[in-house]
Image (cartoon, rainbow, N blue to C red):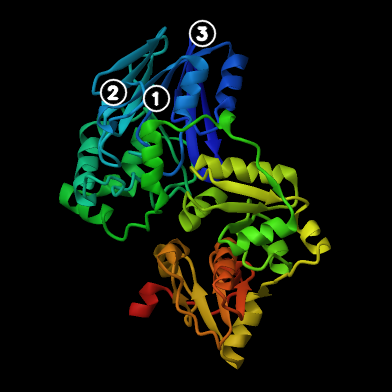
């Protein structure tokens, strides 16, 4: 048996190839599918099967293009009501590739159509070798239950409890677990960093599997759910129909500084993908900094939406190509172009420049003692509860699409997150809205904590 995990760090997404006797199956493919074709060619395998464990909401899948380029069949849960040619999966459905068996378990809960795939290599054992769990069971967590327009979170959480306890936890403890996402994905809350586990390990260590009753499971799984990005339901619908091939995309137009400035004035989102420090030093007024170094596409989808009319600014053509591809992976197709020559061309043309103030943790601490300054924490609630600056107010960056936080424009505002990535996004959005006196905390709360500066936790605050 051949088995390979393909991990896409920027989306915390894992896809898989399983092969035996010249045949291969792909599970949960990413949007750009050339890597599977290249791997299959290297292994002397023909891709004949494409499995989707559910309708993915956080990325656009490449199943339709991969099927068109290989002739493979697509398999997806019957409850997906997929609009492309497919074979609906139900309990007991089996695909054989030589001595390799892939058996379907219907496991509704994360979504109604979710399935898990039990893999058995009969050349080695009649016991299951592993299970591909999609977003039903993660390493240290389970899938969030609020991604269906037709089911309440409580209904899905109940179904998820049943799927876990009546199906997955009945597999042998030695069964390997390979989920579709890792730490950092918004499809769960407490995922560990490991890329695989076993049923036995999860039975003992996964908090969600320690919850004693169905009622308590539903209560905990539906409490304090992180904000659901608006594009999630849109991506699920794209995947229900199947995305158009990336090979059909036209080239991205290059823009002069004058053309870009005109588009900015007409409402385009100028997205600067350079590192935070470069953006802080100088940038196009009104541009938004979402650096390629982090979860670029997730934040672009969350904050700007799929119809964002984006224009890209970067240092190199390679960065432009990477940004364009990452946006396509989450369904952002309406990219209007990029600034030819980057910021060097903008400066040479004599166009206006802006900058963002930055401050160290020690200097911010002194300012809080010596002069009036407000602090905005843009982390999520769980991060805040673990520790925060006493004087800070919190508004998670995830919530910015529902409205920017109220800002006293007469007082400097220091913005921070964990490390500085999200806070620079927040600073650029506040500046685009016309706010001045915005300051980014270098290194975020990590730097504040490392410096041993005063902090509160929710537990201490309640004591």
Q: Secondary structure at mark 2?
A: strand
Q: Nearer the viewer, residue 98 or 30?
A: 30
Asked if one can make out residue 420 in the rendered structure from this viewpoint, the answer is: no
For the point 83% across and 61% down, the residue is: 348
In which quadrant of the rendered view does residue 56 lie? top left
For the point 29% across and 22% down, the residue is: 88
Query: Is residue 118 placed above or below 30 in the rendered structure?
Result: above
Q: Nearer the viewer, residue 28 or 18?
A: 28
What residue is pinned by disc 2?
Answer: 89
| Residue 112, horizontal then vertical, whole percent | 25, 37
Query: Is residue 254 placed above or below 88 in the rendered structure?
Result: below
What residue is pinned by disc 3?
Answer: 22
Asked if one can make out residue 414 in the rendered structure from this viewpoint, the answer is: yes
Q: Pointers 1 and 2 in contact (CB under 8 A)?
A: yes
For the point 21% across and 46% down, the residue is: 151
| Residue 304, horizontal then vertical, whole percent | 50, 56
What is the crowding at mark 2: few (fewer than 14 residues within 10 Å), some, or many (at least 20)?
many
User: Which residue lies most toward the right here?
Assistant: 348
What residue is pinned by disc 1?
Answer: 51
């Amino acid at each position: 048996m051949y088995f390979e995990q393909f991990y896409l760090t920027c989306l915390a997404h894992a896809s898989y190839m399983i092969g035996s006797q010249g045949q291969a199956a792909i599970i949960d493919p990413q949007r750009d599918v050339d890597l599977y074709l290249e791997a299959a060619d290297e292994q002397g395998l023909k891709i004949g099967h494409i499995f989707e464990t559910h309708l993915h909401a956080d990325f656009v899948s490449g199943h339709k293009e991969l099927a068109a380029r290989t002739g493979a069949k697509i398999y997806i849960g019957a409850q997906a009501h997929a609009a492309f040619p497919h074979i609906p999966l139900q309990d007991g459905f089996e695909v054989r590739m030589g001595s390799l068996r892939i058996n379907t378990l219907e496991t509704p809960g994360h979504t109604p159509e979710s399935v898990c795939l039990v893999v058995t290599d009969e050349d080695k054992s009649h016991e299951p070798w592993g299970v591909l769990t999609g977003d039903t069971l993660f390493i240290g967590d389970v899938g969030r239950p609020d991604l269906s327009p037709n089911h309440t979170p409580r209904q899905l959480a109940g179904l998820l409890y049943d799927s876990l306890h009546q199906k997955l936890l009945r597999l042998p403890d030695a069964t390997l677990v390979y989920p579709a996402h890792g730490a950092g994905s918004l499809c769960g809350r407490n995922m560990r960093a490991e890329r695989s586990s076993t049923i036995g390990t999860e039975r003992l260590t996964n908090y969600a599997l320690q919850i004693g009753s169905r009622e308590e499971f539903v209560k905990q799984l539906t409490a304090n759910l992180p904000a659901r990005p608006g594009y999630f339901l849109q991506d699920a619908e794209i995947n229900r129909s199947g995305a158009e091939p990336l090979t059909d995309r036209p080239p991205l137009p290059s823009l002069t500084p004058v053309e870009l400035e005109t588009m900015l004035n007409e409402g385009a989102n100028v997205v600067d993908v350079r590192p935070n420090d470069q953006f802080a030093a100088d940038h196009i007024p009104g541009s938004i900094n979402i650096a390629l170094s982090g979860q670029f596409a997730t934040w672009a989808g969350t904050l700007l939406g799929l119809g964002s009319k984006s224009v890209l600014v970067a240092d190199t053509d390679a960065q432009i190509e990477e940004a364009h591809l990452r946006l396509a992976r989450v369904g952002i197709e309406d990219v209007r172009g990029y600034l030819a020559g980057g910021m060097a061309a903008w400066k040479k043309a004599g166009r206006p420049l802006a900058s963002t103030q930055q401050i160290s943790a020690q200097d911010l601490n002194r300012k809080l003692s010596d002069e009036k300054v407000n602090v905005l924490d843009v982390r999520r609630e769980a991060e805040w509860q673990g520790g925060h600056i006493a004087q800070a107010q919190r508004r998670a960056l995830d919530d910015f699409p529902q409205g920017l936080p109220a800002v006293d424009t007469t007082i400097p505002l220091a913005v921070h997150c964990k490390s500085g990535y999200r806070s620079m996004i927040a600073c650029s959005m506040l500046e685009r809205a016309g706010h001045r006196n915005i300051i980014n905390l270098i290194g975020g709360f990590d730097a504040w904590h490392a410096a041993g500066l005063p902090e509160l936790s929710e537990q201490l605050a309640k004591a």
